Image (cartoon, rainbow, N blue to C red):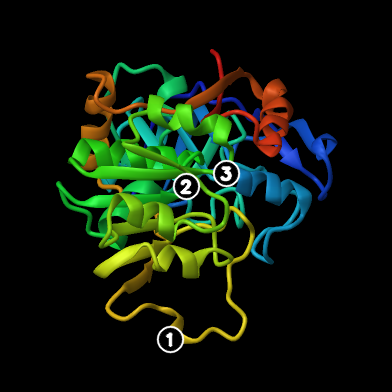
């Protein structure tokens, strides 16, 4: 067992955390005093500074997650903060800025809706930035998912064309900013005509209003189809998305905002000849530290836009944040900052 390095003896015995004791409405999110988590060998204890609030955590609160989630549970699939304690051989030092996400966090073990969280060292990404916590706290899950979809899923290159279906989601907005920074031309969708201007404002080349069929709109712009498509809406529109892509182009299935994850009686022949279909559902390790550092630098330089919808202060505002996420009326990421 390797010895740990800690920030000192100032860690209290208890901490404040948001706990879901049973599935339910917003009142199921209870602020409690709970023991500070004890770090296991190979894990890292992080003092949480900020965390994003996500639809999956709303699902956990409602009791609609899979059997991996048990109660009581501290939700939170992502967070940023500073290392409090880590193994000496982990390469992490107390006080170091880090991000973490996914890997069962907030689902099979307690997550980031708390003052401290412990996670496996393999899903900790160190970084250095002077950006405020409210900005950095918006990034881990949405940037990891967007980056992994564009690279592992689509192998997107400069000069190519990309369709993002589900473009006003946080992952869709992040994918657009990363793709534009890469040098791609981006088409992106919204179901609301009134939000097309919002897509233009974040740098989308061609905002499209999605009425359930996109092939004609896409091919009016690009007769041969796009080089790549990122599917975030789900299987209910997948066949139509496949029809927007050129021969030897690729569709990456990453999300199902509309709720349909499977296709009954699926036939491979629904895939147009020569079009490739893949998927992405990766983990923290898919966002290397140097890539995250590049993204932070690009944000600081103004080349990447962070779609933050609203910032909340303190665990007391978690209910408000989840209510706003559930309403879906505000474009961008909802971030809770734990003020010192």
Q: Residue at x 82, y 49 (%)?
A: 22
* Image-quadrant location for residue 260: bottom right
Nearest to viewer (mark 2 / mark 1):
1
Q: Characterize the local packing of mark 2: few (<14), some (14-19) or many (20 or more) Cα atoms within 10 angstroms.
A: many
Which residue in the protein does label 2 denote?
A: 119
Rendered residue at 22%/41% (across/down): 291
Toward which corner of the image does residue 318 lie, by quadrant? top right
- Is residue 186 depicted above or below 196 in this figure? below
Q: Earlier in the sequence, mark 2 or mark 1?
A: 2
Q: Nearer the viewer, mark 2 or mark 3?
A: 3
Query: Which residue occupies the foreground of this view, 184 or 43?
Result: 184
134 w.r.t. 69: above or below: above
Q: Secondary structure at mark 1?
A: helix
| Residue beneath disc 3 | 191
> Could you tell whether 220 is left or right of 38 in the image?
left
- Mark 1 crowd level (few <14, some 14–19, many ≥20, 10 Å Cα): few
Which residue position is annotated with label 1? 269
Q: From the image, which quarter does the C terminus lie in? A: top right
The x, y position of residue 162, in whole percent, is 30, 51
Name the spot of residue 277 as percent of width and height, x first: 36, 72
Q: Is residue 340 above or below residue 235?
A: above
Callout 2–callout 1 Cβ contact below 8 Å: no
Does the rendering let one see residue 120?
Answer: yes
Per the model, the C-alpha gap separating discs 2 and 1 is 43 Å
Whether residue 286 appears in this view of the structure is no
Q: Quick one: quadrant of the N terminus?
A: bottom left
Separation of disc 3 and disc 1 at Cα?
Answer: 28 Å
Determine the image quadrant of residue 283: bottom left
- Judge left or right: residue 31 versus residue 3: right
> Disc 2 and disc 3: Cα gap in Å?
37 Å
């Amino acid at each position: 067992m390797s010895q740990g390095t800690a920030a000192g003896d100032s860690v209290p015995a208890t901490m404040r955390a948001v706990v879901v004791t049973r599935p339910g409405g917003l009142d199921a999110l209870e602020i409690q005093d709970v023991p500070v988590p004890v770090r296991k060998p190979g894990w890292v204890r992080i003092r949480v500074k900020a965390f994003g609030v996500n639809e999956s955590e709303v699902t956990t609160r409602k009791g609609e997650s899979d059997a991996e989630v048990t109660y009581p549970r501290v939700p939170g699939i992502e967070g940023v903060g500073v290392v409090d304690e880590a193994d000496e051989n982990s390469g992490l030092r107390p006080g170091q800025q880090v991000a973490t996400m996914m890997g069962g966090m907030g689902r099979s073990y307690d997550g980031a809706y708390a003052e401290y969280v412990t996670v496996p060292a393999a899903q900790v990404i160190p970084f250095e930035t002077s950006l405020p916590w409210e900005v950095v706290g918006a990034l881990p899950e949405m940037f990891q998912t967007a980056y992994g979809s564009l690279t592992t899923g689509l192998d997107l290159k400069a000069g190519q064309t990309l369709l993002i279906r589900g473009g006003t989601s946080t992952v869709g907005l992040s994918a657009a900013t990363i793709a534009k920074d890469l040098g791609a031309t981006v088409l992106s969708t919204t179901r609301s005509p009134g939000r097309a201007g919002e897509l233009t404002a974040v740098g989308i080349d061609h905002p499209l209003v999605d009425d359930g069929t996109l092939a004609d709109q896409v091919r009016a712009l690009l007769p041969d189809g796009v080089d790549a498509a990122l599917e975030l809406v789900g299987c209910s529109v997948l066949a139509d998305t496949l029809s927007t892509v050129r021969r030897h182009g690729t569709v990456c299935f990453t999300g199902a905002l509309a709720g349909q994850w499977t296709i009954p009686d699926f036939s491979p022949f629904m895939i147009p000849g020569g079009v490739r279909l893949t998927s992405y559902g990766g983990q923290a390790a898919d966002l290397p530290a140097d890539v995250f550092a590049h993204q932070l630098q690009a944000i600081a330089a103004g080349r990447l836009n962070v779609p933050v919808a609203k910032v909340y202060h303190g665990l007391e505002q978690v209910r408000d944040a989840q209510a706003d996420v559930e309403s879906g009326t505000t474009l961008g990421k909802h971030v809770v900052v734990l003020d010192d």
